């Protein structure tokens, strides 16, 4: 993870860049503490937090960090002499707000860097990304301001916001406790007990006299074990209608992140689906891992990001990761055992334990609409058929892929099943075969230029109805008649031949 990404995750409430002589793109590999009473131990790629020394007193440690190859140093009270020393040493200087607790900043920064390392180790396309990115996704879906905390009420990650935050959120991010009268009320109302006991979205009314706004919250659990809490503060506008449902799904996805952090050697759930789709693990073993019944119906839904052809690679990957987080939240809210994974530029969702008539079209449309509304992304979703058992999910996956392939030729459809686009699927696959075998072409049709080819195809598509074909091309009917005659002359073929007309429709579509 680059220093820029670390700073984006941590945000303005905690640190601010003072000097960055080599920019912000260097990778941060670890977070270390530098104490004036200890011998500096700094390695290349470190983000060094200088504690116990402010102002000029931190000067030796800044120089030592630069000499050791540190990417950046963080200090309190960054006087001008420190800025100059950092610039001379070639190390970025970060200013930490005086009220921030060092242990809190260290935990947050290490969490960000650790998540990035786990992502890199598992493969960029096979995990959902860091907790900060997930917090931002939850904020988009709920319309609120998000904090993710552990069981000790320590903030692990939070969303960025332009809305005014209340006193409780401000103090939480800075690593300090909220107002005791408010915390006492939460305890008396049984809020903490309800959050620890199960998957219940808890509503908490605002308290204007304490400067506290309305909130909703949900506990994060791994089985019966509580892992933490997600808090969503209402900002300047009300929370979305789907906020509570989105928060429930978000809690299940967040649980995966926290388990991954606690058990980095364990197999990720995202890898389970990739293993199933690649044939590296059998379906029964996968079902056992996720607590699904292998004998109950299942289905695969596949999603693709559209309209990003001109985005640079980094931007495209960030958007795809954001889309995958959104899909995971919705899928987890729909089915606890849902698995989501990226493969070959597509995002697959496996849904198990389904009723025979599962309304997957509704879920898929919700995901596509949420991507457009909250992230401004164009996403297409293709639904594979619901199969009888988990062992047959490759049939569903293959069908979903076929549908998505066909949809890529017709961008008007956002969500589809095979029944919706069966003719397009068959034509798309036939055209793919023609494209792979150039010898199966009529050279006479290849002689037509673009205008004649388009005109002849429109004419054939409309069964020779000149008026309708001309209206489709926005030309006069006589113009179209001339072009069709001219096409036959240039190609030297007879349009009275039905077999010629049939094959011409196929070959002209290749263009």
Image (spheres, rainbow, N blue to C red):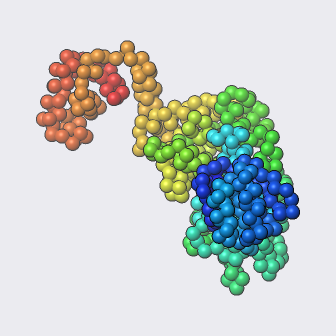
**Residue 317 in the image: x percent, y percent?**
57, 45
* Residue 302, horizontal then vertical, whole percent: 57, 39
Horizontal side of 347 relative to 95 (left or right) equals: left
In the image as oriented, which residue stretches furthest toward the right? 37
Q: Confirm whether residue 394 shows in the render.
A: yes
Q: Position of residue 213 (x, y in %)?
A: 66, 76
Residue located at (23% from left, 36% from top): 469
Question: Going by the picture, which residue comes out furthest to the top?
Answer: 439
* 8 versus 312 height, above or below: below
Task: Say which quarter of the image contains residue 147.
Answer: bottom right
Question: Does residue 421 appear to the left or right of 113 in the view shown?
Answer: left
Q: Which of the 4 quarters of the picture holds residue 243?
A: bottom right
Q: Is residue 71 above or below residue 243?
A: above
Residue at (87%, 63%) from the top-left corner? 37
> From what the image shows, is residue 104 above or below residue 481?
below
Q: Is 171 or 304 nearer to us in this picture?
A: 171
Answer whether residue 182 is visible to the viewer in this image. no
């Amino acid at each position: 993870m680059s220093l820029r990404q670390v700073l984006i995750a941590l945000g303005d409430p905690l640190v601010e860049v003072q000097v960055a002589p080599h920019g912000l793109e260097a990778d941060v590999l670890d977070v270390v503490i530098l104490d004036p009473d200890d011998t500096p131990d700094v390695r290349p790629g470190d983000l060094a937090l200088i504690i116990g020394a402010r102002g000029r007193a931190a000067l030796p440690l800044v120089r030592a960090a630069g000499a050791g190859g540190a990417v950046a140093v963080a200090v309190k009270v960054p006087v001008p002499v420190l800025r100059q020393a950092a610039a001379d040493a070639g190390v970025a200087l970060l200013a930490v707000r005086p009220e921030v607790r060092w242990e809190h900043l260290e935990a947050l920064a290490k969490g960000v860097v650790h998540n990035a390392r786990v992502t890199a180790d598992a493969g960029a396309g096979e995990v959902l990304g860091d907790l900060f990115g997930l917090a931002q996704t939850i904020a988009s879906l709920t319309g609120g301001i998000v904090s993710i905390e552990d069981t000790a009420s320590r903030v692990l990650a939070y969303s960025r916001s332009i809305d005014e935050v209340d006193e409780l959120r401000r103090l939480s991010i800075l690593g300090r406790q909220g107002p005791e009268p408010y915390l006492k009320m939460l305890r008396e109302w049984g809020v903490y007990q309800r959050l620890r006991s199960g998957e219940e979205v808890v509503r908490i009314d605002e308290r204007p006299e304490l400067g506290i706004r309305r909130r909703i919250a949900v506990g994060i659990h791994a089985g019966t074990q509580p892992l933490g809490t997600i808090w969503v503060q209402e900002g300047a506008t009300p929370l979305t209608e789907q906020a509570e449902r989105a928060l429930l799904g978000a809690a299940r996805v967040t649980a995966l992140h926290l388990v991954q952090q606690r058990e980095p050697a364990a197999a990720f759930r995202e890898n389970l689906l990739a293993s199933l789709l690649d044939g590296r693990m059998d379906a029964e073993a996968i079902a056992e891992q996720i607590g699904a019944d292998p004998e109950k119906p299942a289905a695969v839904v596949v999603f693709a990001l559209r309209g990003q052809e001109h985005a640079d690679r980094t931007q495209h990957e960030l958007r795809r990761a954001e889309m995958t987080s959104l899909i995971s939240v919705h899928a987890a809210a729909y089915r606890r055992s849902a698995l989501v994974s990226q493969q070959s530029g597509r995002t697959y969702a496996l849904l198990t334990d389904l009723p025979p008539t599962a309304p997957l079209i509704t879920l898929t449309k919700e995901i596509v609409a949420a991507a457009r509304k909250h992230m401004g992304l164009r996403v297409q979703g293709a639904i594979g058929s619901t199969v009888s058992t988990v062992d047959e999910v490759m049939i569903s996956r293959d069908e979903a892929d076929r549908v998505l392939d066909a949809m890529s030729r017709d961008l008007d459809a956002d969500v589809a099943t095979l029944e919706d686009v069966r003719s397009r699927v068959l034509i798309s696959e036939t055209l793919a075969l023609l494209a792979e075998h150039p010898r199966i072409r009529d050279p006479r049709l290849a002689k037509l230029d673009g205008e004649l080819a388009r005109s002849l195809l429109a004419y054939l598509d409309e069964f020779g109805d000149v008026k309708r074909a001309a209206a489709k091309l926005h030309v006069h009917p006589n113009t179209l008649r001339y072009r069709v005659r001219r096409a036959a002359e240039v190609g030297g073929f007879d349009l009275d031949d039905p077999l010629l007309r049939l094959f011409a429709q196929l070959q002209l579509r290749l263009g």
